[in-house]
Amino acid sequence: MQSAYPLHDDPIHAPLLIGFGRRPALKAARCLVTFLWWLCTAGLSVLYAGEYLLGPQDGLKIRVFEWRPSVGVAFEWVPLTGEFVVSASGTLSLPIIGTVPVAGKTLEEVSDIIGERLQQQIGLQKRPNASVEIYNYRPFFVTGVVGTPGKYAYMPGLTVMQALSMAGGTGSADPKTLELQREALVSHGSVRELEAERLGLLARQARVDAMLSGGAKISYPPNIMSRADRPAVAQMMGEEQALLDSRLRSVSTELTSIKQSKVLAKNQLDALKLKEASLAKQIDLANKDLSSINKLISQGLTVSARQLGASQNVGDLESRNLDVALAVVKTQQDLAKLDQDALDVNEKYRANALTEASELRDRLAANDEKLRTSQALVLNMEMRAPGVLPSTDTDGRPITTTKISRTVSGEIKNFTVGDNDLVLPGDVVRVERMENKASAPAPSGRKESGKTPSQ
């Protein structure tokens, strides 16, 4: 009697046939359900994988089934069922169908290739269905200024922040490295402190120069004007201008007071001179009256008492005239002193400015020497151990940037990324120290090319 399952006698198919054989119809139905479940699994694998492109080191789980409605049996191609790893050349070496190139292809494309190759190799009328899943993604790599550079297992949905967390974050956790980081922070703090002190000294010097030149507005040097938008520098410039205005007002007030005193002294001098002239006339008249009385006395026409009164009047007028003359001299001395006081006021403020300028020169020289020394220490530390420097400056601004090197269409491309950007299998995440502290890393979602990095 001929077997109802002639394929059992096929030396190729017989070992692959799942032992459903001559089971009841219920068993065949269960096989159909199982087969349909694998079809759904294959579809879900493709759906969740999206447009993910395979590459070397990706681990694939493959199952191949063929449903034969004539006998109601699902055949599993056992040699093609199992876990396989994509080779360095981007291929899969599979039994029966041989080498299959899979690099740069999606799971759906690989599934179609396996089914077609098997159909062609065996000569089947209908293409078998292959379920291809990723059970292990190829690793990604983290390097640069991180705690633990190296290779890490990929997880779907991995972000840059999570990848850096897996690598120990930016910087290092080594105690010696942390000590060097503290030294680096101290050195950077010293440099910033000296730079701030230098800006203050230069601002004061600009104020002193304006004071010495008689200017009412401070002309600041370029290295201060270039930072004028910073609140601290703007406040410093405002305070120096206010101090200059205050000192100019003090000079003006003192000179105005002296000028008013001079006006009063001149008015007093003019009055004294008028009084002196009046007394001179009175003395002249008194002397003439005394001469007339002396003639009358010599002729015996008047008494001597009148002569005595006239003499006393002349003496009194001459005494008053002498007092006025002394007052004139004193007023002239006061005017000369007021002129000297005006000169002294200008010289006093000029001398103070010159003294401050000399002190500022000495302090600037000392500051320059300390600043050069501190900068040399920082540079030496950066040259000896660039990877141990902290990832933020003393203001908390990032001084590192994160980049991803990714193979796109066979070409390696670099992208600057943010914390929330996605990492893909095979990516190389590189944390670099920025050359210019003024620059900042691109925010999340913005890259050097202006596009989101993709395969």
Image: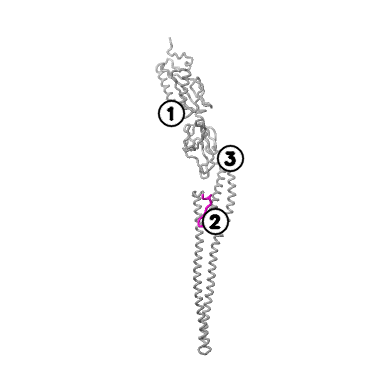
Q: Mark 3 points at which residue?
A: 385
Instruction: Note whether 374 is above or below 169 in the view shown.
Output: below
Residue 216: x %, y % from top left: 50, 57
Asked whether the viewer can see residue 298, the reply is yes
Q: Which of marks 2 and 1 is nearer the N terminus?
A: 1
The coloring applied to the image is: one colour
Mark number for residue 47? 1
Residue 153 visible in this rendered orientation of the protein? no
> In the rendered structure, which amino acid carries the disc numbered 1?
Leu
Front position in the image: 159 or 342: 342
Dot placed on the residue nearer the N-terminal end, 2 or 3: 2
Q: Which residue is drawn at 53% across and 26% down?
A: 89
Q: Is residue 261 magenta?
A: no
Q: Most prominent secondary structure in the magenta stretch?
A: loop
Q: Front-most of 354 and 296?
A: 296
Q: What residue type is labelled 3?
A: Ala
221 inside magenta stretch: yes
Disc 2 marks which amino acid? Answer: Asp
Q: Name the residue under label 2.
A: 209
Q: Is mark 1 on a helix, strand or loop?
A: helix
- Dot 1 surroundings within 10 Å: few (below 14), some, or many (20 or more)? few
Query: If you read the primary sequence from the N terminus, does the residue marked by circle 1 or circle 3 appear first?
Result: 1
Q: Give the range drawn in magenta.
A: 213-225
In front of the other: label 2 or label 1?
A: 2
Label 2, secondary structure: give it: helix
